[in-house]
Structure formats: C-alpha cells, structure tokens
Image (tube, helix red, strand yellow):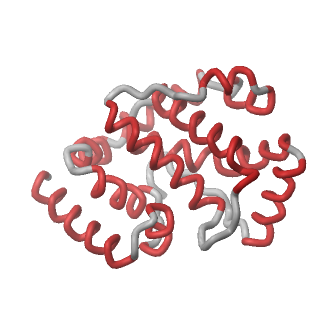
Amino acid sequence: MHPLHYSAAAMNRQQEEHLIEECRTDRAAFGQVFDYWYKPIFGYILRRTADYDLSKDIAAETFLKAFLKIGSFRYRGISLSAWLYRIATNELNQYYRNSKYKPRSLQQLLENPQMEKLLHQPCDDEREIMERELQAFADFNEIRANLLRLDIKYQEVIALRYFEQKTNSEISTILNKNEGTVKSLLSRGLEKLRNLL
C-alpha cells in the first residue's frame, strides 16, 4: 500500500444510489458520505500538496461543495466516488492556479451545523502521524517535488494512477477526458518525470 493511502471498500451502485437518496431527504445523511470517503479524499489531496493544513482546507471545501450539490447529483456514468475525486481535483487545480488557496465556502461551513464534523476532527495526533509519514518517505517526496514541476494535466493523471491506484477508465471519468487522452498524458507525463529524476 502506498504511504498515506487510505481505501474505502468499494460501494456498489445500488448502495450509492440509496445513500444519495437518503441525502436528498435527510441532509444529515451526508455524514455517511463524509465518513466513508473523507480519508481517501484527504489522502489524495495530502499526497498532491504535502501540506497538512492546506489539505484540511481543500478537503473541507471539497466536502462542503459535495454537501451543497448532493441533492442534484445523478448517475450519468460517474460514481459518487469519482464525483468526489473530481471535486477535489478541481479544488487542487484552483489552488495551483491561484498559488494561495482561499476556500470560498468557509463561512457557509461555519454556519452549517451538518458540516460540524469537519471542524472537530481529531487534529493533533493525526497531524503528527501524517507529518512523520511524509518525512519517512523521502523517495515519495522527491517524486512529488518533481511531479509539481510538470504541467497540471500530467500531475493529475500520474497522481490518480500511481498514488490513488485508479484505473485509466476511472481517471477518464474523474477528469472527464477520454481514455486515449489519459493514456497519452500518462505516457508523456512519465517520460517527463523520468527526465527530471
């Protein structure tokens, strides 16, 4: 298993549809979405940024946006998991475009009692463990540092493929690109990364 990799057991489509329906009728049911996917999404963000506090902000914004839009989510060839990764990827891209991440919905988060969990996660122990793990994986950090030198389009496909162990098909869904484009980006991105290493 990759350092800092969290996995949620696969939820089938019927279970996801049932959970989404629950969220439509009872907003508190979103807590199940949060409980199920927070660690994998947070891990993905942390591996991309290597910054604990920034990752918490981006993860909070990701789940807040999901909470606000879950009522309009419909299965259209994309799973709930892929949808969450897509939101997180968009937030990461916003961060890299703007250099300084400013969560737009923080005030909504503070005002919304349903999202209180995000503010009361056990932080100190988790932070220490995460920071120790990040330091322990020098090779990972070197690769991640060089990965950040690549264009975003290469960063996201490589991170999803090798850090998150997503298939090309899943990456295609998350990034809304066809599979051929994903393969091409992976191939070119890995060649560029090899040259940097």
Question: In the displayed structure, would residue 81 be above or below residue 100?
Answer: below
Residue 141 occupies quadrant: top left
- Name the spot of residue 101 as percent of width and height, x first: 42, 28
Residue found at x 47% / y 29%: 52
Q: Nearer the viewer, residue 89 or 8?
A: 89
Residue found at x 54% / y 42%: 42
- Name the spot of residue 108 as percent of width and height, x first: 67, 26
Residue found at x 36% / y 34%: 135
* In this picture, residue 66 sits left or right of residue 2: right
* In this picture, residue 8 sits left or right of residue 15: left
Q: Nearer the viewer, residue 168 or 71?
A: 71
Total numbered circles: 0
Residue found at x 65% / y 46%: 66
Query: Which residue lies most toward the bottom here?
Result: 180
Q: Nearer the viewer, residue 109 or 2?
A: 109
* In this picture, residue 30 sits left or right of residue 78: right
* In this picture, residue 182 sits left or right of residue 21: left
Query: Which residue lies most toward the front here?
Result: 72
Residue 50 occupies quadrant: top left
- Name the spot of residue 4 as percent of width and height, x first: 49, 46
Residue 159 occupies quadrant: bottom left
